[in-house]
Image (cartoon, rainbow, N blue to C red):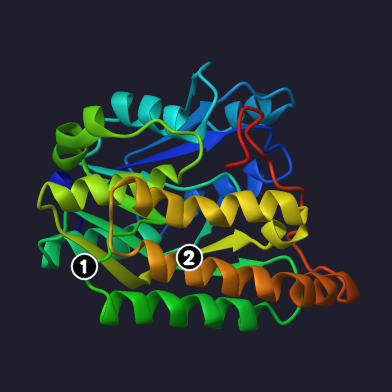
């Protein structure tokens, strides 16, 4: 397809100690069938060599954010981005080769102000089980609870004008999910959010290798985000959290029995000021 200049894509990647993942992430962006406009890596106080690895890519703009937290890093990246579409992925995200094309097609053909794509999981055998379950949950949510705003930080895009409109409204609690908070504020301002299954990315299965306490803090941030906004979706999200925690032990045991496949699983990088990654 021929891309419109009006739909240039800036990709922002918050990074905190991601030396083991950043190369695969940036390689996937380098191999896009249609190049993105710019790639911004936001160093959020990394103590490893994440920055030196990212700097080897000539298309990467490396910037720094000293305020600790993925929300602050995202904000810093979005503030300097030039694209009409502001994409955000994580450092362990590996986007599909047609990812940027699918994003442009979606915004050209629809009136969405923000979208979140589908994710699959890498790092263990039979990952299709977890990937299929994730897709079913997201499709179910999108179809049966269309008023429930959600964005997934590992694979999401928002148009710049919508971002500028809501950025000063965003909540700064370290006990919530910043991507869901952004979705709620966009929805409250009347912006349209879509789930697009064809905008695909892979993310690490490392979450299920984290400690039970860390996983509990991470998953509980979902209902806490909706509760903060007095959303009716607090209860279904709470039920979803308990369901995930109920699956945690058998899934973790399964992962330990199965030898990992490439790319290898790495430890979850936790923001040192909070239990939210």
Q: CA distance from mark 1 to mark 2?
A: 17 Å
Percent from the top left, x then y, of residue 266?
77, 51
Q: Nearer the viewer, residue 121 or 28?
A: 121
> Element under label 2?
helix
Which x, y percent locates residue 5?
Answer: 16, 45
Return the residue at label 1.
Answer: 147
The residue that appears at 56% across and 25% down in the rendered structure is: 44
- From the top left corner, tell me how far across and down residue 187 is, in percent: 18, 53
Q: Nearer the viewer, residue 125 or 152?
A: 152
When asked about the image quadrant of residue 192, the answer is bottom left
Q: Is residue 137 left or right of residue 184?
A: right
Q: Quadrant of the N terminus?
A: bottom left
Q: Quadrant of residue 15?
A: top right
Establish if 58 lies above or below 27.
above
Residue 52, above or below 151: above
How far from the left and from the top, in percent, is residue 162? 16, 42
Determine the secondary structure under disc 1.
loop
In the rendered structure, are the residues bearing label 1 and label 2 in contact, judged by CB atoms less than 8 Å apart?
no
Please tell me which residue is depicted at 27% across the width and 81% down the height of the picture: 143
* Residue drawn at (40%, 74%) of the image: 138
Looking at this view, is 68 or 128 the one in front? 68
Which circle marks residue 238 in the picture? 2
Quarter holding the C terminus is top right
């Amino acid at each position: 397809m021929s891309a419109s200049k009006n739909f240039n894509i800036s990709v922002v990647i918050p990074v905190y100690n991601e030396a083991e993942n950043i190369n695969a992430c940036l390689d996937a962006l380098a191999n896009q069938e249609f190049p993105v406009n710019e790639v911004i890596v936001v160093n959020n106080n990394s103590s490893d060599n994440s920055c030196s690895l990212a700097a080897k890519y000539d298309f990467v703009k490396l910037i720094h954010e000293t305020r600790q937290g993925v929300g602050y890093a995202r904000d810093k990246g979005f503030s300097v981005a030039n694209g009409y579409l502001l994409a955000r992925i994580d450092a362990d995200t590996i986007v599909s080769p047609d990812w940027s094309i699918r994003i442009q097609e979606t915004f050209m053909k629809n009136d969405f102000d923000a979208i979140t794509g589908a994710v699959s999981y890498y790092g263990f055998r039979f990952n299709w089980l977890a990937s299929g379950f994730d897709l079913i949950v997201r499709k179910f949510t999108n179809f049966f609870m269309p008023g429930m705003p959600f964005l997934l930080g590992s694979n999401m895009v928002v148009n710049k004008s919508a971002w500028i409109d809501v950025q000063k409204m965003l909540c700064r609690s370290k006990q919530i999910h910043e991507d869901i908070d952004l979705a709620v504020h966009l929805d409250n301002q009347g912006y349209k959010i879509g789930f697009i299954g064809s905008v695909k990315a892979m993310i690490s299965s490392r979450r299920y290798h984290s400690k039970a306490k860390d996983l509990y803090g991470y998953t509980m941030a979902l209902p806490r985000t909706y509760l903060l906004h007095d959303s009716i979706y607090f209860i279904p999200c709470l039920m979803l959290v308990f369901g995930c925690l109920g699956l945690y032990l058998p899934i973790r045991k399964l992962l330990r029995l199965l030898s990992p496949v490439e790319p290898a699983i790495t430890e979850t990088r936790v923001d040192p000021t909070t239990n939210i990654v």
